[in-house]
Image (cartoon, rainbow, N blue to C red):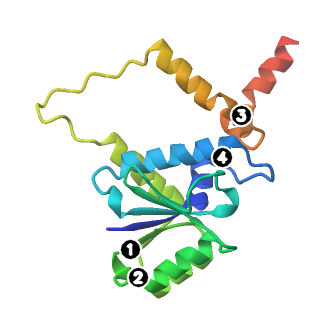
Amino acid sequence: MPYLIDGYNLLFAYLGTQPSRKLSKALERARRRLLELLRLGHDGELNEVTVIFDAAHAPPGIPDQYDYQGIQVVFAIHDERADDLIEKIIRRASAPRQLTIVTDDNRIKQAARRRHCPVRGCADYLNDLERRKSHKPVEASGELAKPHVTSAEETQHWLHEFGDLQRDPALKELADPYGFEAENERDAS
């Protein structure tokens, strides 16, 4: 079943935060992490997943539409918002009952329901992806897969890749949602 995903709506549900006025490289990295989660959760049916983002937050130099390991990624362009593009795709769908819309946006939900498209809320959809990812079938040999041990070099690579997320003010609460770091700093002084 094809999926049409409201990209930033799902991304901010995934991150548990809303966009800040000052978007940074952290948003681009978070977008890639979301696409990777989609790739893992839709393994085997990737060609049926399309994610629509607003072009206002598109990384510089990236095409308006591209393939991310089987997932179609589209940035709404020419002053068109992602919501408008999603609605247009819903209106033009030849088999809308087979097109699942993923969003929490009420306007898009209404457009989808008018065409009898199944609608998934972002939190439910993310939970389904996590379940799919964690219930991958065991290898054909029946042996349990050996757990992957991350090398020190690989750990350093990922720390370098995502290290600035913790310092990003828009995402700071995600790194320390209960304020333990601030509390520890006060206790140390």
Which class describes the residues within 10 Å of circle 2: few (<14), some (14-19), or many (20+)?
Answer: some
- CA distance separating discs 4 and 2: 30 Å
Q: Residue at x 49, y 13 (%)?
A: 152
Residue named by callout 2: 93
Q: Which mark is residue 125?
A: none
Tell me which numbered mark, 1 or 3, is placed earlier along the sequence.
Answer: 1
Q: Which mark is residue 27?
A: 4
- CA distance separating discs 4 and 1: 27 Å
Q: Secondary structure at mark 1?
A: loop
Q: Which mark is residue 178?
A: 3
Residue named by callout 1: 99
Asked if residue 134 is positioned above or below residue 101 in the image, the reply reads: above
Q: Position of residue 187 (x, y in %)?
A: 83, 15
- In this rendering, the label closer to the viewer, 4 or 1: 4
Q: Residue furthest right?
A: 189
Tell me which numbered mark, 2 or 1, is placed earlier along the sequence.
Answer: 2
Tell me which numbered mark, 4 or 1, is placed earlier along the sequence.
Answer: 4
- In this rendering, the label closer to the viewer, 2 or 1: 2
Label 4 with label 2: CB-CB less than 8 Å: no
- In this rendering, the label closer to the viewer, 1 or 3: 1
- CA distance separating discs 2 and 3: 44 Å
Tell me which numbered mark, 2 or 3, is placed earlier along the sequence.
Answer: 2
Query: Residue type at mark 2?
Result: Ala
- CA distance separating discs 1 and 3: 39 Å
